[in-house]
Each structure stands twice: as C-alpha cells, then as structure tokens.
Image: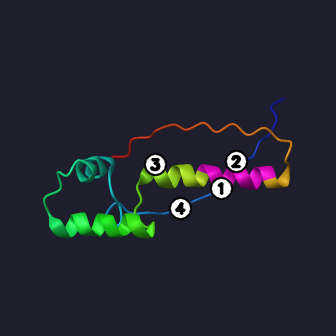
Amino acid sequence: MLEVREVRLLACTPFSNGVDSYVSKEERKAYETGQIKDPQRRAAIAAYDASGESHHQKDIVFAQVRLVSAHIKSIDPDISVVDILIEVLMM
C-alpha cells in the first residue's frame, strides 16, 4: 500500500519582469560593464540597487528558499532540510 503524502505551497512571491526594478542577468552584466547607454536606465538601476529594490528571478527564488528553510527549522530545529533547485524555462 502506498503512503499518502501531502504537498503544500510554502512560499509564493509574484513578480513581473516588466516592472522597472526588475534587472535581468543580461542587463545586470551590461550595467556592471558600462554597456548600458541609456543614462536614465543606468540611473534607475543605481537607485534600485542603493535602495535594495533591484531584483531578478534568482534573488527571489533564493529568498524564498531561505524563508521556507528558516520556517521549517523554527518548527523543528533538529530536522534536516535539503534544498533542491531545478531551473525551469518558462516560455
């Protein structure tokens, strides 16, 4: 007989890559190497970085993992938590 298991959503952080504070990996590299020509976009990225509002998918995923792991550990400090990240390409 199979053991019944539950899967529950522990964290969800909706975001949009269409908001101005979203900085893609490619755009981040261009910014860091001085290749962004638009002075307004360069200034916007600098302002978002300074305020901590700049984000991209990797930041959001790792923040969720830290949050969920900390929550699980707060319930049972002796539990072993293994985080497995799988990159999913969304089209």
Label 2 to label 4: alpha-carbon separation: 18 Å
Q: Residue at x 55, y 49 (%)?
A: 62
Viewer-nearest residue: 10 or 2: 10
Q: Quadrant of residue 49?
A: bottom left
Question: Where 83 falls versus 75 (above or below)?
Answer: above
Are the residues tagged 1 and 4 within 8 Å (C-beta)? no
Q: Which mark is residue 67?
A: 1
Q: Is residue 26 left or right of residue 84?
A: left
- Looking at the rendering, the stretch of residues picked out in magenta corresponds to 65-73
Viewer-nearest residue: 69 or 7: 69
User: Which element is circle 4 on?
Assistant: loop
Q: Which is closer to the viewer, label 1 or label 4?
A: 1
Label 3 to label 4: alpha-carbon separation: 12 Å
Q: Residue at x 30, y 51 (%)?
A: 28
- Residue underneath mark 4: 13
Q: Which is closer to the viewer, label 2 or label 4?
A: 4
- Whether residue 17 is visible: yes
- Residue underneath mark 2: 7
Magenta run includes residue 67:
yes
Q: Amino acid at mark 1?
A: Leu
Circle nearer the N terminus (3, 4): 4
Circle nearer the N terminus (3, 1): 3
Viewer-nearest residue: 79 or 29: 29
Q: Amino acid at mark 2?
A: Val
